[in-house]
Amino acid sequence: MAYPGKAPSRSDSALSTLPLLIYLAMAIGLMIADHRHDFGTLVRDKAALATQPFWWLASSPTMLLRASTETLATRNQLQADNEKKQKDLQLAIARIHRLNAVADENVRLRRLLGGTRGYALDVRMAGIVDIDLDPFRQRLVLDAGRDAGVKVGQALIDSGGVMGQVVEVQPHRSIALLVTDPDHAVPVQVARSGLRTIAYGTGRTDVLMLPNIPQSADVKVGDVLITSGIGGRFPAGFPVATVTRLKPDQLRLFVVGEATPAAHIDRGNEVLLIGNLPPAVDVGPPAPAGMHNPSAEEAAAAATAAAEQAAEAAKLKPGQKPKPQPKPPAQVD
């Protein structure tokens, strides 16, 4: 043992280096054993397993921070996606509503046009601008007027039946009187029996009055009333109403009937203005099949030439022959 102030001896130096040599020998032995028998891997695995909780505790703040950031980013992304989906859904719903409205309008227009199929009629479509359903004044304002060819007296129909008639025409607007107006009357006919009568408006949108029906008349509840065509204002054959009630009048001499209008008085956006077309004049026998069908201009020219020829023939003296007329050019079909 070395004491202060005294130089260490050789034996003390040897004792101090002996542990170092022992440590080196142990290290070399462990290295050789690890190289040959892989003892170090087993020791490291056990040590790693033992130190794993300490590593988890040490890295938990970083892991929590990263998880919170990812969760927040995912939540924000989900909210943005949800808002986008909601906007797309609202837009799709609006488009579906628009398509439904267009489909309903298409159905109404088809019904309007289908109601005139089979009739030789002049048909014009008009939109409803305003409607007045006051009990004492029931009228429509249409967006078509004199400039569109609307005339006073034209009948109005919708997809259900007769709706009224035009009573006033302006350049760009027209006013129509509804069949339910107290001042309106339309000649009708029972489709089943052919009985003719007149349907009067009552000021109510759901009732037409049929007064002065004979007791012996063939009319029943449920009969369909159509226009008879008498008077020439309403074309014949269009539905007007359906009989819903029959009762005797106060003197019990006639039967009074009530009918529900066939037209949709309180709904709808379009009506058809209808009128009878002038009959086509066809003078003479029909042309044989395969012959040229002359146009209106050719027929007029032929009529003029025939008239001139007749005038010249009237001016001729007895026994004088008329001048030969040039033949018209042949028509090539």
Image (cartoon, rainbow, N blue to C red):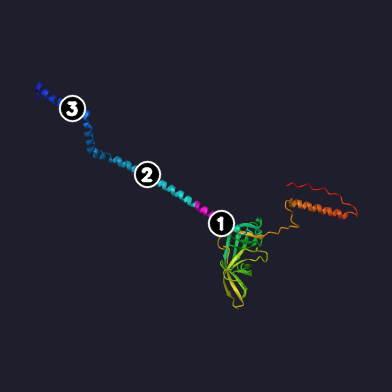
Give the mark nearest the N terminus, 1 or 3.
Answer: 3
Q: CA distance from mark 2 to mark 3?
A: 55 Å
Instruction: Please indicate whether residue 113 sits to the left or right of residue 302 in the image.
Output: left
Instruction: Inspect the magenta stretch and tell me whether residue 97 lies in it.
Output: yes
The residue located at (32%, 41%) in the rendering is 66
In this rendered view, identify the residue nearer to me: 47 or 42: 42
Instruction: Inspect the magenta stretch and tell me whether residue 144 lies in it.
Output: no
For disc 3, the marked residue is: 29
The secondary structure that dominates the magenta segment is helix
Rendering coords of residue 310 (x, y %): 84, 54
Give the mark nearest the N terminus, 2 or 3.
Answer: 3
Image-quadrant location for residue 242: bottom right
Image-quadrant location for residue 166: bottom right
- The boundaries of the magenta stretch are 95-110
- Residue 240 against residue 149 in the figure, above or below: below
Which disc number belongs to residue 319? none
- Residue 266 against residue 11 in the figure, above or below: below
| CB under 8 Å between discs 1 and 3 | no
Q: Amino acid at mark 3?
A: Gly
The residue located at (40%, 47%) in the rendering is 79
In this rendered view, identify the residue nearer to me: 327 or 87: 327
- Residue 255 against residue 270 in the figure, above or below: below
Mark 1 closeness class: few <14, some 14–19, many ≥20 residues within 10 Å: few
For disc 2, the marked residue is: 74
- Residue 257 against residue 16 in the figure, above or below: below
Q: Quadrant of the N terminus?
A: top left
| CB under 8 Å between discs 2 and 1 | no
In this rendered view, identify the residue nearer to me: 202 or 9: 202
Which disc number belongs to residue 107? 1
